[in-house]
Structures are given as structure tokens and as C-alpha cells.
Amino acid sequence: MQEDGNMDKIVYTGGSFDTTHIGHVNFLRQCSMLGKVIVSLNTDDFIKSYKGSSPIFSYKERERFLKTLPYVDRIIPNIGGADSKIAIELVNPDIIAIATDWISKDYYKQMNFTQEWLDEKNILLVYLPYFKGISTTQIKDLCKK
């Protein structure tokens, strides 16, 4: 549940959310504690170009599932693909939330922005604890077996 001071904060997060699992749900729950959660959902075309294969579930199916979660206030398509700044500027968030599994990766390069850009937009980047023990990759690997 959001604290009163956080009710006006807009939290942006993005992803593919293919085969959504308890780790995703836990992450979105944590996001909701910071404010209103807007998910920038990757399109099928972007997932195919980025990951080299189509998602298991279509955009509409992934969107429909995310809409069932009480932690998600709004879903928008990631219209910029690799240039996430387009969707971020559309949302105009106070906070961008990502999981701590990105700490060892170049999230700035992935999202195509810099700390200076975030500072200019007055956006706080927040790392939330990663839920260990399950991942979309693990689920897909299990399904292949």
C-alpha cells in the first residue's frame, strides 16, 4: 500500500513480462510502494529484434495479464523500442525503477540515456531487490525440456 506522500509520485518501469512470474509480481509490488506504477511494455517486434525470437505471449496477452495485477496503474507500449527515452518522456515519471540484477549491467546504455539526462528531467533511478530463484529464461528452458 502506498504511503500518502507517495500517492503523487509516478513510477516508470519497463520490460517484456513474457511468462510473468512471482519475481515480476514482487517487483511490481515494490514499485507500487513508491507511487503510481506505469509499465512500458515491450512490443512483439522489439522483443524479436532484441532477443532474436518472438515472445511466447503476444503484446495483448501480456498486457491483459499485467492489467490483472493490483500493482499496475497503467500500461503503455514501449513505442521507442531501444530508445526508451521516448516512452519515458511520454510518462514523465518521478522515478524509474529497475531490479538489482541490472547493477552489474550497463542499464544506461540499455535504456539509451545518461545520468545527466535523468538529472535534467529530475528523474530518480531506483534499484529494487531482485527476486532470486526464478526467471523467464529458466521457465523457457524448463518448457523446452
Image: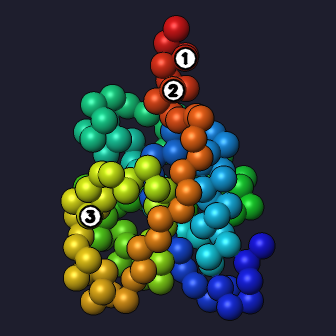
Identify which residue, 44 or 130, lies in the foreground: 130
Residue in the picture at 57% in, 41% down: 132
The answer to whether residue 13 shows anywhere in this view is: no
In the image, residue 55 lies at what x, y percent? Answer: 43, 33
In the image, residue 69 lies at what x, y percent? Answer: 71, 55
Q: Pointer 1 and pointer 2: residues touching (CB < 8 Å)?
A: yes
Identify which residue, 74 or 33, lies in the foreground: 33
Residue for badge 3: 108
Query: Label 3 to label 2, Cα distance in Å?
Result: 25 Å
Question: Crowdedness of circle 3 by 10 Å Cα count: few (<14), some, many (20+)?
Answer: few
Residue for badge 2: 138
Residue type at mark 3 is Tyr
In the image, residue 126 lies at what x, y percent? Answer: 47, 71
Earlier in the chain: of badge 3 and badge 2, it is 3
The answer to whether residue 124 shows anywhere in this view is: yes
Question: Crowdedness of circle 2 by 10 Å Cα count: few (<14), some, many (20+)?
Answer: few
